[in-house]
Image (cartoon, grey):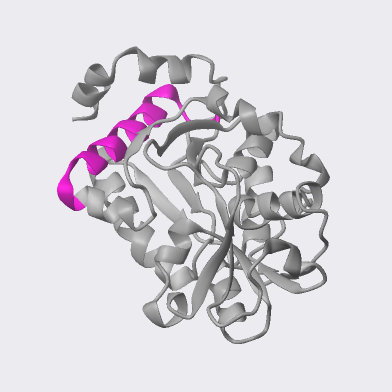
């Protein structure tokens, strides 16, 4: 099946792998890691069936790697510990430079942007009012949820907040609802997937600028054949109604081919000043 789909996709797929350097010996078990935007139980419930589908379709063995927090994921990514990874766009900028990861898939219907939420009853109605207040973030380098908001707080609004890091998007939202923080950084996709008892108690105060979304990327040790299989099978999964429903939980609105050069905008953005080494 993957050969037929690759044929239909044509040059776009082939070109994506021509520049990939030859890697080490092909792994016996492919490690697929996911940036922990949600708690680990939710990630397992979302990605477990996707990995199972990928394994059944390719005949290869895959291990789903779920790290306890974003900094642990970042360390693994920078060490090249994962064969395949779903990461935020700035993670990709760093990982492509340091390890040679190459993007193969992304959401082609949705751009990434950050949001800042406050309690629905909060008196804060303007972003400038956050100056000096506590804002919860998943981690310093969660791009939409922390990196971009922190950069915009400093460069656009000249405000300084008290940063509180709480490991996941869900925890950041909950901190606001429970009164442990005045606001939280997140992204619209994770906010929309919160339980109603959390989402209904919050409101979006601010939306950041838009950027390329999270890619699925592969380490250069994967052969072009295996990288092509992974790409083609995930595209095929998204083309089926049941598969599209699985991918919607990631969330992907519509999965399509990613190209490394699409992330050059981020490479030129100057976010190094706000990036924190894990």
Q: Position of residue 159 (x, y in %)?
A: 81, 59
Residue 230 magenta-highlighted: yes
Q: Residue at 65% of width from left, 38% of height from top?
A: 95
88 w.r.t. 186: above or below? above
- Quarter-of-image position of residue 136: bottom right
**Residue 14 in sight here:** yes
- Quarter-of-image position of residue 264: top right
58 w.r.t. 245: above or below? above
> Considering depth in this image, is 86 or 214 the residue closer to the camera?
214
Q: What stretch is highlighted in magenta?
A: 220-242
Q: Where is residue 147 in the image (x, y as percent from the top left)?
A: 69, 51
> Considering depth in this image, is 168 or 113 the residue closer to the camera?
113
Q: Residue at 23% of width from left, 23% of height from top?
A: 3
The mark total stands at 0
* 34 on left or right of 58: right
62 w.r.t. 11: above or below? below
């Amino acid at each position: 099946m993957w050969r037929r789909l690759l044929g239909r996709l044509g040059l776009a797929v082939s070109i994506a792998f021509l520049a990939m350097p030859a890697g080490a010996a092909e792994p016996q078990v492919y490690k697929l890691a996911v940036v922990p935007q949600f708690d680990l139980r939710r990630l397992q419930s979302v990605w477990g069936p996707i990995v199972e589908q990928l394994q059944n379709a390719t005949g290869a063995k895959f291990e789903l790697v779920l790290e306890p927090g974003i900094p642990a994921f970042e360390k693994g990514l920078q060490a090249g510990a994962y064969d395949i990874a779903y990461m935020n766009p700035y993670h990709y900028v760093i990982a492509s430079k340091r390890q040679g990861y190459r993007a193969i898939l992304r959401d082609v219907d949705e751009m990434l942007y950050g949001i800042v939420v406050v309690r629905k009853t909060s008196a804060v109605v303007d972003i400038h009012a956050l100056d000096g207040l506590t804002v919860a973030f998943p981690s310093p380098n969660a791009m939409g949820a922390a990196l971009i908001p922190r950069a915009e707080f400093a460069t656009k609004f000249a405000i300084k907040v008290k940063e509180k890091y709480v490991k996941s998007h869900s925890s950041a939202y909950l901190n606001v609802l429970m009164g442990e923080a005045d606001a939280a950084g997140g992204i619209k996709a994770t906010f929309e997937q919160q339980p109603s008892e959390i989402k209904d108690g919050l409101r979006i105060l601010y939306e950041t600028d838009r950027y390329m979304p999270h890619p699925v990327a592969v380490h250069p040790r994967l052969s072009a054949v295996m990288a092509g299989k992974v790409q083609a099978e995930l595209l095929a999964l998204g083309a089926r109604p049941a598969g599209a429903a699985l991918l919607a939980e990631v969330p992907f609105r519509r999965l399509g081919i990613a190209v490394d050069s699409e992330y050059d905008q981020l490479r030129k953005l100057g976010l190094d000043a706000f990036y924190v080494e894990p």
